[in-house]
Amino acid sequence: MLKEDNRKLMLEKAIKDHQYQASALLEILHKAQELYGYLNREILSFVASSLKLPPSHVYGVAAFYNYFRLKQPGEHVVTTCMGTACYVKGAEDIISAVEKEFNVKRGDSTADGKLSIFTTRCIGACAMAPSIVIDDEVVGKATKEIVIEKIKLLLGGKKTETS
Amino acid sequence: MTTKTVSLKIDGHDISVQEGTSILEAAIENGIDIPHLCFLEGLTKTGACRLCLVELKGQAKLFASCSTPVSDGMEVITDSVKLKEYRKKTIQLLLSERTHVCSVCVANKNCELQALADKLGVDHVAYEREWTGEKVDSSHPFLVIDRNRCILCTRCVRVCDEVEGVHALDLKLRGKDSQIIVDFDDSWANSTSCTSCRKCAKVCPVGAIYVEGEPLSQTKDRNIANFVLSRRKK
Amino acid sequence: MSSKRLNFCWGVKKLKPADIIHLAETELDAHRSYKYRINVCCSSGCIPFGALKVLKAFEEAVKEFGVQKECKVARTGCIGTCSVGPAVMVEPGDYLYQSVTPEKARQIVRDHVVLGLPVKEMLYGNKAYFEKQHRLVMKNAGKIDPYRIEDYIAAGGYSALVKCLLRMSPKEVIDEVWLSGLRGRGGAGFKTGQKWTFVARAHRSPKYIVANLDEGDPGVFANRTLAEADPHAIIEGMLIAAYATEANKGYIYIRAEYPLAVETLKKALDRARAMNLVGQNILETNFSFDIELRLGAGAFVAGEETAILASVEGNRANPRPRPPYPAASGLWKSPTLIDNVETLANIPQIISHGGLWFSKIGSPTCTGTKCFSLTGKVKNPGLIEIPMGITLREVIFDIGGGPPDNKKFKAVLVGGPSGGCLPETMLDLPIDYESLTKAGAIMGSGGIVVIDEDSCMVDTAKFFIDFCVDESCGKCTPCRVGLHKIQETYTRIMDGEGKPEDLDFLRSISSYIQDASLCGLGQTAPNPVLTTLRYFGKEYNEHIVDKKCVAGKCSFKHQVKEDEL
């Protein structure tokens, strides 16, 4: 069961705003991911019963679209654009270097859950290729050195805070 | 209300059928065989397997005969050299996609894919074959799903939704990673929506969904969707 | 009356057609009261590089120097020079400043606005970039504030809608679109007038319109830029389409990966609704049409016209076979018009200036202009709009400046991941639907990616196949399994295990996938394979026979092992 809290209230409101229409499923899933960060079984189950949709349909839709995350992402998220312009300008080299440096595979999180690495197909900053999104910051004309440095700073910064 | 009849030619034979009929249905009605897999009488036509492709005179593109409605004066070619070649390719691709070993399959000799391969003269698979390692879900008291044998025709998904009405089955992911799922990708035993009606096993063209311990010749029933739907109309 | 109070009034009052014209005049007067106007590009290309800070710095500097009354600072959409952002344009005179920082902003206000001396060393020096362009769809981009509907109206916006409502029958509107020769900008190039006629002829209600802004092609950002810079052009185009085809409800399907475009469109729709331009009894006439946004969620295939319908309905974006065509049976089995947003944004101008005027722009078979995002290895990447029919060479070398660092041009990819890779010898090809298709490429939704000698064409083709394998919905066999077999073959070739017969295999399975696939994704996915084989066959042979990659991209890991033994 989904915990009774503000987020649930907001999700319920969004569902109501869409008049419980089955066709609003994607909109609702977007809202849910915005509120919870990802879509777990409880959330999907709540959405399915609210919209009166079969569970397999809701899961099938959520798992079809790349934008929806079914697993909890790490504390920090690094997304490498793998659009054509970025690829041509060496995005693959950058992400491979990041994978190696932090011992994490694309689409996955580090063992301590601090860092997740994703790839995406074009964020549209092609003129600044290669582009990497580190949390909410877009780094244009990126190099592997800059990106690794920035991630290290991010992880290091967090560490001193918690220790 | 009178329904209009439409006259067309399939492989040179003159045919008259009701308006709204698909080319494939018109062919079946008139004893002309067009290979097909995902199509099943009574279910939504998805045009997914691409085996039933035909040529239409005057059109460069190929059309899925299951989903293309007939029209007056249409001239259909179902067995050109190119179509035969393409069908063989499709069958080989399906055979190479997952783990298809007829001799150890529950559906051996009761398999639509195997029968088509035989009929179309597919005597080898020219593509590198995959050996998938999907887990077999046999948690349900008697229904088993072996995703290694699935050809993603979605007959089970459609029969569950459109005939049984519960939509316990669907697909997850996409592309070559697509898989049939039960509810929230649960094990079948934990499904809250499945009614254990067996229709999925009855319509599965291969040996991906079957009833444990029951010969497939007994389970399979191509007519189930049509039958239930026609009873419901009464 | 101050413009602030005016805004307030318009927001409450139900607007009538004459009010639009009145509002345009009032706004223009307000614009004329300023001596200078500073347009700060705040599109997705410039924001990551500090455009919002620059905007704030301009506002503060204008206050600091006390020139608020004579200098207007405006937040605008894309100016087009995305590689030297943040870009700032000072009017009059269209002085374009590049890579502006908050410090430079202050200097620009001090020197240019206060002293009247443009800061020469900060100006964008490349005149050629704009010379061959023709800004039609993007005419307002970088000039108006996309958040202010008044700016759009002052630039002549919504006057085409008024013209339709007051003086034209739906049929006359369609006739005008026919006459213009406009073709769908989403890629296939279907005649827009014809499409509208099909939908208009379907006498069933409700009817829907879907505006396609699912720009999933990697390396393409033309539609996004349009939505961020001039959202009302899309909305007005949709309204006119709805009037012409007698549609009741519209959806704009936009990628969730474009948050700024989503926000801009949302605000634009809210404003249009508040001003009686969208919704019930538009401008107090009998015409009603509502528009909703629908967010995509990361599926390239959702740009295909039947898949977009599935997605708008809240399903997996699986395409379905045609016939039936969406014009007869689309959203919820009702007649549906699906147009790309760039197509729709052309409509207001066609109505305002007439179809005949439009038909004289571009080439005779392909009228009008096309927006392209020009990226990859060129000196001046960015968003460009060119008249149809100019050559690839003009785009890449005259506008784009050719590859940087004295590298040699190798290929150009036109039309996204399912486009074609064309070599130097094809550069004099005019850009129009037929010529591109004949050469093995497609117009697609407007991407031109330039590749230089550092790239391996085998690797490039594999990149696109990887993309299409990932993005295949998996419904039909040829695309789902066939593309995967192509991918495996490429992996082998690049690992050093290629065989001469692989080339024949690639050719034959490619044409099978083109012919037998269910939707446009599969039907065009093999294009990069076929064009690289056709134009760069030598590189394949080097990979297979000599186990050599001139660009040094391929690992030949199996080959290396043998050498080491």
Image (spheres, coloured by chain):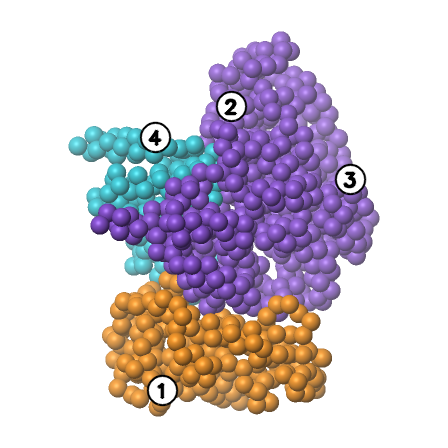
Q: Secondary structure at mark 4?
A: helix
Q: Position of residue C515 (x, y in %)?
A: 56, 66
* Chain B palette colour: orange
Q: Which residue is mark 2?
A: C99
Callout 3 and callout 4 share a chain: no
Q: Which mark is residue A146?
A: 4
Q: Which chain is cyan?
A: A
Q: Secondary structure at mark 2?
A: loop
Residue C505, x across and y down, in percent: 46, 63
- Asked if disc 2 and disc 3 are in contact, CB closer than 8 Å, the reply is no
**Which mark is nearer the camera, 3 or 1?**
1
Residue C249 appears in the figure: no
Q: CA distance from mark 2 to mark 4?
A: 20 Å
- Mark 2 closeness class: few <14, some 14–19, many ≥20 residues within 10 Å: many
Write down the residue under mark 1. Answer: B109
Crowding near pointer 4: few (<14 within 10 Å), some, many (20+)? Answer: few
Residue found 53% across the figure and 89% down from its top: B234
Residue named by callout 3: C18
